[in-house]
Amino acid sequence: MMTSLLILHGLLAFALLGALTHQAVAVAWPFRGPARDADSFAKRFRAVSAPAYTHTIIVLFLVTFAIGMVIYPAYRLNVRPYLQDYRMFAAEGAFEIKEHLAAIALGLLPLYWVLWRRPSLESGAPNDVAQDARWARLAVTLMIAIAAWASFFVGHILNNIRGLFGT
Amino acid sequence: MRALRFTAVFGATFAILYVMAMEMNIAAFTYHPRLMAFGLGSEAPRSGPAMYWYGWLATAALGGLALGLLAAVLPVRGAKLWYALGWLAPLGAMLAALYFMLPFFTR
């Protein structure tokens, strides 16, 4: 059961990374001009409609996080003692970082939703406020993306150390 | 604007309280995975390890909810403040969390 959930957790995280990376690149490095002029892979990657990913990202994040919460006790009982016995403190610390970044990203989700739900927050606002809104949207999206990427890498490495049948 | 105030204050408070809860071990509850039992507050391990992470999340969420609601009902103006608070505080919290984890990598 735990092994199945661990695999599902990894697969959902992979889908989350795809959506988050598309959105983060599209907002950090947008393609200027009509989408039909995006004639290369990189340009098409940047030309995606960033707001369209928002709800998918929120759902994927919440489901992936929830499964992570369910399988976490198996890590504490079976994997962490193994890391400590073999003095793999960096791997243990990397997991601590994963849980902390993911937790803070979870708290950012409501603001993330508001910032992407209402891009029109800027319309009609003074220029400096509109600029602040764009900065906030970029920063929050990048922070969630970085947390997701870091969590994915750490999870993958720990899975390689003692994953599937260690739990 | 209320939604922005609530979510910005919630995110900032959640992040700051989470790091404080983690560093000072202020957990709303403790989970004992070997026993599959919960205890109120930060309990010492009963049998096997004690898990505080769920309790830290609850502590941060409750604090964030309280301050977020307060910010939503108070007549505070200034969108610039909320936009900045919403990402600067969590960014600081993420950096603080990384700093607190350094001992794992310097042992």
Image (cartoon, helix red, strand yellow):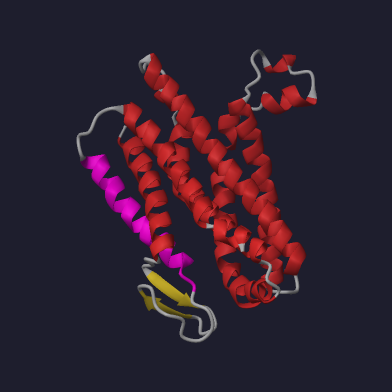
B24, A154: nearer the viewer? B24
**Location of residue A140 in the rendering, given as x and y in whole percent from the top left corner:** 50, 37
Of A44 and A90, nearer the camera is: A90
Q: Does residue A80 appear to the left or right of B80 in the view shown? A: right
Residue B96 percent across, percent down from the top left: 47, 49
Asked if residue A74 can be seen in this view, the reply is yes
In the depicted structure, whether residue B8 falls above or below residue A68: above
Residue B72, percent from left and from top: 27, 41
Q: Residue at x 58, y 33 (%)?
A: A52
In the image, residue A58 above or below residue B50 = above
- Residue A96, above or below A44: below
Whether residue A54 is visible, yes or no, is no
The span shown in magenta is B51-73
| Residue B65 belongs to magenta span | yes
In the shown orientation, is residue A102 left or right of residue A40?
left
- Residue at image point 68% right, 25% down: A46
Q: Is residue B43 above or below residue B26?
A: below
Quadrant assignment for the C terminus of chain B: bottom right
- Residue that sits furthest to the front in the current view: B107
Residue visible at 59% across and 37% down in the picture = A53
Queried whether the magenta region covers residue A18, the answer comes back as no
